[in-house]
Image: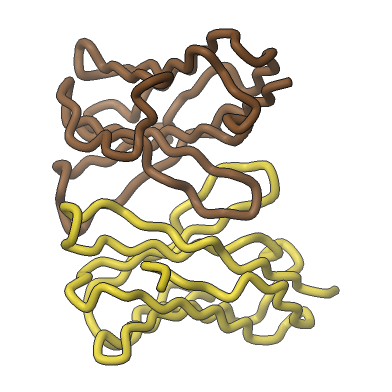
Chain colours: A brown, B yellow
Amino acid sequence: EAEVAQSPRYKITEKSQAVAFWCDPISGHATLYWYRQILGQGPELLVQFQDESVVDDSQLPKDRFSAERLKGVDSTLKIQPAELGDSAMYLCASSPGLAGSSTDTQYFGPGTRLTVL
Amino acid sequence: QKEVEQNSGPLSVPEGAIASLNCTYSDRGSQSFFWYRQYSGKSPELIMFIYSNGDKEDGRFTAQLNKASQYVSLLIRDSQPSDSATYLCAVNPPTGGFKTIFGAGTRLFVKA
């Protein structure tokens, strides 16, 4: 069964350091999402790609976060510098539908648990 | 008012009982509704989606949608301890380009 891959699974870093997360979506899925989930809350969308293009990054803190999907397949999310409040689970999801589809069905990867000390 | 609201729980039911999880949403134009299950420390897993008013059944799970009242529910029949998890309701409101909005989730405990 096809799955979304993410790495690393866990990351511990000190504040002001740079961190990067990688995601490989299910093959053939054009739409890719990065979410942040704080303990006790639902996932919050950070950025959405359709192929290599950013469709929505309105919730991405652009002063420290960046995301790219250069070839329209795998994607990287970077934080520089990390802050204490960035500690969370970072989830990647992919969807076979087009971005903005009202019937979007998303499949999540295992996530990266980030702890900032 | 939050866009998607769920009772945080915990909801505790005995094994074999029916667990009923509820979700309300604010955007009346929303068309797609999803239920995800999330075990502690794991990522969300899609259980069901529903687009039309009424009931949709899949095994022990039934999703119910009432657009007039703006609520969607998930029933789990014959609840098992393995159903103990957080259940996330997600909605695709047209405002904001159908970006998926998740509720905070309801924690369910099924007692053996």
Location of the N terminus of chain B by quadrant is bottom left
Residue farthest toward the right in the current orientation of the protein: B112
Whether B96 is drawn above or below A49: the answer is: below
Q: Is residue A44 left or right of residue A42?
A: left
Q: Which one is nearer the viewer's eye here, A53 or A95?
A: A53
Q: Residue at x 62, y 82 (%)?
A: B19
> In x, y percent, where is residue A38?
59, 44
Q: Which one is nearer the viewer's eye here, B46 or A31?
A: A31
> In x, y percent, where is residue B99?
25, 51
Q: Is residue B110 left or right of residue B72?
A: right
Displayed quadrant of residue A102: bottom left
Q: Residue at x 59, y 8 (%)?
A: A17
Displayed quadrant of residue A53: top left
> In x, y percent, where is residue B92?
26, 61
Whether A3 is drawn above or below A97: the answer is: above
Whether A35 is drawn above or below A20: the answer is: below
Whether B22 is drawn above or below A89: the answer is: below
Q: Which one is nearer the viewer's eye here, B85 or A14?
A: A14
